[in-house]
């Protein structure tokens, strides 16, 4: 059955700047493409949202690959998926979008939720963390009031002493069950990270992502051996040998972004290997459009079937002023996934796109 591929660009302003690189300028506009793949019966959707500083290819490279695939004739989803497996390291954001659309279409054809294609024991409900900006902003208590039990904050954006002071003040106002998930985005050297962890000992810190600037596996492993706080690798995963990473007992948690890993299937495969090695995996977004968030939620539900109970970083749609579809609904820190085929998206808001599907 012949496939028809089309692109629609989007430009989505953020309600307030997304915390950027350490002490850098926050992101104010999210740009990318929604790709549609259709056959005679159904249409599947995917989101290409390049974010080079997080590990994707540049937008121009992603667009070029998307256009190449759109110009070619495809007889079915399996042929397309097989070729994407050879390309996901070079253009992960574009491959993720194409794969998502193909899997969405395939799961609609087979009348299965997409998550069930990845793992037939996938969850139907996932826990999410709130994203409340940086440590010294006044948003974390709002997330607590909204029912989130895990609140993510960016650190490493101000002087160490100031951020430590802010975290202590914030922690004093949190309910006992609330935990803070911190992300330093590679801000510190080893001594600075040690100082931060020592100074915040006793605070309700659930984990700390990417504390070290361009860490070696041995350096990261050493820091983990010196703190009870779970440390997580995110951007550094791409720079570290995967076999060595999975074999190291001091690596506890991986943060996987399907747009960086190159697709849902590859991300799930890595999560399977991590679970077999006794490690946790958290799924997060690249401040994607609703199409990308729905895809990441399907992946998170599949990963929950491997290691249930972790909060995933997918509550980011509220940062966008407008979107290309309805994002997942969140209630008291959870989102429930519909038991319908595909991603669970039935309508794309064409009026919010700068281009249209025809």
Image (cartoon, grey):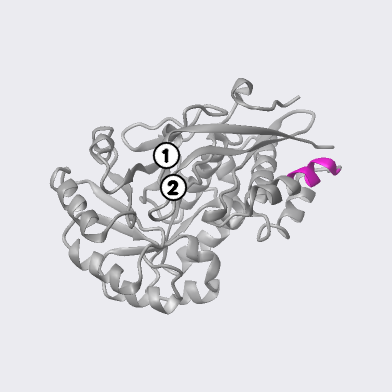
Which picture quadrant has residue 292? top right
Residue drawn at point x = 36 percent, y = 51 percent = 310
Magenta residue span: 66-72
Let me know if residue 1 appears in the view: no
Query: In this view of the protein, which residue sits in the foreground, 227 or 62?
Result: 62
Residue 67 highlighted magenta (yes or no): yes
| Rendering coords of residue 323 (x, y %) | 53, 29
| Direction from residue 112 to residue 302 in the image, left or right | left
**From what the image shows, is residue 54 above or below residue 105?**
below
Q: Quadrant of the C terminus?
A: top right
Residue drawn at point x = 35 percent, y = 64 percent = 231
Per the image, the residue denoted by label 1 is: 17
- Name the mark on residue 4: none
- Name the mark on residue 25: 2
Query: For mark 2, does the 10 Å Cα neighbourhood hold few (<14), some (14 to 19), or many (20 or more) residues?
Result: few
Residue drawn at point x = 46 percent, y = 63 percent = 275
| Rendering coords of residue 263 (x, y %) | 61, 52
Let me know if residue 341 appears in the view: yes
């Amino acid at each position: 059955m012949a496939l028809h591929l089309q692109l629609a660009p989007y430009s989505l302003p953020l309600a307030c700047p997304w915390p950027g690189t350490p002490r850098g300028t926050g992101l104010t506009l999210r740009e990318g493409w929604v790709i549609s793949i259709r056959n005679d019966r159904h249409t599947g959707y995917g989101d290409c949202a390049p974010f080079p500083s997080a590990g994707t290819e540049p937008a121009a490279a992603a667009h070029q690959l998307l256009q190449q695939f759109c110009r070619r004739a495809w007889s079915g989803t399996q042929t397309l998926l097989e070729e994407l497996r050879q390309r996901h390291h070079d253009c992960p954001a574009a491959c993720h979008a194409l794969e998502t659309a193909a899997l969405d279409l395939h799961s609609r054809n087979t009348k299965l939720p997409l998550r069930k294609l990845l793992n037939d024991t996938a969850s139907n409900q996932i826990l999410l963390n709130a994203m409340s900006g940086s440590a010294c902003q006044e948003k974390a208590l709002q997330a607590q009031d909204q029912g989130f039990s895990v609140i993510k904050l960016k650190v490493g954006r101000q002087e160490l002493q100031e951020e430590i002071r802010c975290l202590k003040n914030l922690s004093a106002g949190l309910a006992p069950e609330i935990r803070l998930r911190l992300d330093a985005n590679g801000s510190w050297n080893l001594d600075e990270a040690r100082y931060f962890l020592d100074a915040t000992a006793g605070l309700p810190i659930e984990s700390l992502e990417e504390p070290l600037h361009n860490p070696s596996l041995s350096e990261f492993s050493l820091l983990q051996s010196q703190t009870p706080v779970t440390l997580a690798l995110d951007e550094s995963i791409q720079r570290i040998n995967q076999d060595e990473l999975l074999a190291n007992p001091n690596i506890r948690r991986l943060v996987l972004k399907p747009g960086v890993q190159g697709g849902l299937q590859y991300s799930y495969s890595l999560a399977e290997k991590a679970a077999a090695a006794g490690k946790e995996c958290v799924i997060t977004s690249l401040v994607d459009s609703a199409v990308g968030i729905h895809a990441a939620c399907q992946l998170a539900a599949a990963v929950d079937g491997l290691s249930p109970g972790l909060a995933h970083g997918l509550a980011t749609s509220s940062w966008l002023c407008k979107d290309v579809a309805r994002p997942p609904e969140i209630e008291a820190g959870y989102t429930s996934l519909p038991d319908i085929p595909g991603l669970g998206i039935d309508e794309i808001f064409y009026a919010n796109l700068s281009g249209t599907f025809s």
